[in-house]
Amino acid sequence: TPIKAGAIVTLDSTSTNTNAPVVKQAAVTDAIFGIVVYNPIQSTFIGNERIAIARDGDIVWLPAAAAVSVGADLYFNASNQVTATVTAGNSIVGKAMTKATQAGDLIQVELGFRTTEAGE
C-alpha cells in the first residue's frame, strides 16, 4: 500500500530487512515511529523506496479533523488527520502549535509521541 507525505507510521515488526528500519501506516493504537516528510519531487512512496521521517521534537504541518486549540494534545485518525478528542489507548502525535477552526485546516504540530492510559 502506498504511503503519502504526512502519513503517521510505525515500525513494521514483520520486516526482515536488517539494513534499515521499515515502516508502515500506523493504526491509532500503534506506537508511532514518525511522520513521513513532504518531498516536492515525490509525494507517494511504495515498498523499498527511501523516505524521510520527522521524529519527536520536530514541528510539522498536519491537517485537522475538526477545530483544535493551541496547546491541545493531538491524536490521529485513519485519514492521518489530527484531533484533540481524547481517546484512551490511542497514540498521541504531539501538541498543537497553531489552532484549527475547522476540519481540513493545516496546523503546526510539535511531535511528541506517546500512548494514553485508561482514564486519561
Image (tube, grey):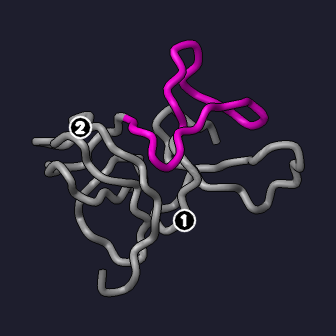
Residue bearing the label numbered 2: 104
x, y percent for residue 26: 55, 56
Residue 30, numbered circle: 1
Q: Residue at x 32, y 50 (%)?
A: 82
Neighbours of disc 2 within 10 Å: few (<14), some (14-19), many (20+): some
Q: Residue at x 22, y 57 (%)?
A: 72
Q: Is residue 11 left or right of residue 116?
A: right
Vertical placement of 49 versus 58: above or below?
A: above
SS category of the residue bearing label 2: loop
Quadrant containing the N terminus in the rendered view: top right
Quadrant containing the C terminus in the rendered view: bottom left
Q: Residue at x 43, y 55 (%)?
A: 112
Residue placed farthest to the top in the image? 41
Residue placed farthest to the left in the image? 101
Give the residues drawn in magenta, as a range: 36-60
Q: Is residue 39 magenta?
A: yes
Q: Residue at x 23, y 37 (%)?
A: 104
Identified by mark 2, the residue type is Gly
Identified by mark 1, the residue type is Asp
Q: How many marks?
A: 2
x, y percent for residue 16: 88, 54
Q: Where, by quadrant of the figure, is residue 108 drawn? A: top left
Q: Where, by quadrant of the figure, is residue 100 drawn? A: top left
SS category of the residue bearing label 1: loop
Front-most of residues 51 and 112: 112
